[in-house]
Image: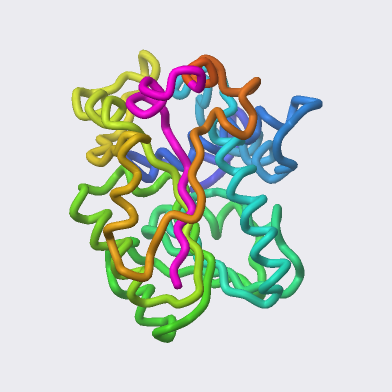
Amino acid sequence: MEANGRTGKEEVSLQGVPETLLWPLWNRAAEQKREDRLIDDPFSADLVDRIDYDFEANFGKPNASHAVRARVIDDALKLWLEKNPEGTVISLGEGLDSQFWRVDNGSMRWISVDVAESIEMRKRFLPAEERMESVVSSALDDLWLKNIPQGSKAFIVMAGLLMYFREEEVKELLYRIADHFRESLAMFDVIPVWFSRKSLKGMKVTKTYTAPLMPWGLNYGDYSWFDEIHPRCRIKRKMTYADPFPERMRPYSYLLAFPWLTNRLAPGIVQLEIT
């Protein structure tokens, strides 16, 4: 697709779940304007300037949610890379996330697994890297797993992904990951049940944008569900979005004083350990 002659920006045509890759991009880009920004992500600001898309009309005023998620996963991944400097990172459904450049230690291997529309966007807008491999595949397919030897050690990122699958699909995906890898970590975010149900009714983010269906949600108080998926898989760490930076996640941070509300209403971030 070519640049729009009126704006000098590049046109994009995305619908459904692939369009959601622009949502966290918008929030991460806005974070770059803050002196107290949670992440340094110049790629995001550059891409928002380059892409011909009405981000604010569709997604509304920016918020810190995606920056919080990015910061938490970045920090965990940097710690892992300190112990595994030549380790393999597998990012499922990362869209236009520039996490590779935020955490790059100069020796890690990166595998980006995504649907064709998203991989095409990455090739258009992000630079190629020798240590980065792109695989066109749904996270639910076996294609990407077949290219990785059984028993491999990896850090698997699934940011903004699992809510778009059904519960049985989430369980099967996590089981296959736990069964395939050894001494690995997987990290992802989880929406609560109320948010999932809202999306199934047609959640209007703004007047012009309706979020895709998000069939799967799990309440924060029910995260023990993850410990039952596979005998070698357990929760290593969990937190609500408000825990790491409460001043940036109001009103969710107010829930922390009321555990019963937190357990029902709060979105969370989970790190699974695969032994």
Q: Does residue 141 appear in this view?
A: yes
- Residue 8 belongs to magenta span: no
Give the residue drawn at x 39%, y 85%: 150
Q: Position of residue 217 (x, y in %)?
A: 28, 38
Q: Which residues are magenta?
A: 256-275
Query: Which one is nearer the viewer's eye here, 169 or 1?
Result: 169
Give the residue drawn at x 57%, y 31%: 243
Q: Quadrant of residue 144?
A: bottom left
Q: Quadrant of residue 88?
A: bottom right
Q: Is residue 237 left or right of residue 195?
A: right
107 up-or-down from 72: above or below: below
Q: Position of residue 219 (x, y in %)?
A: 32, 34
Q: Position of residue 100 (x, y in %)?
A: 64, 59
Residue farthest right in this picture: 35
Q: Is residue 197 left or right of residue 150?
A: left
Give the residue drawn at x 74%, y 31%: 37
- Residue 265 belongs to magenta span: yes
Q: Position of residue 18 (x, y in %)?
A: 38, 45
Q: Does residue 120 appear in this view?
A: no
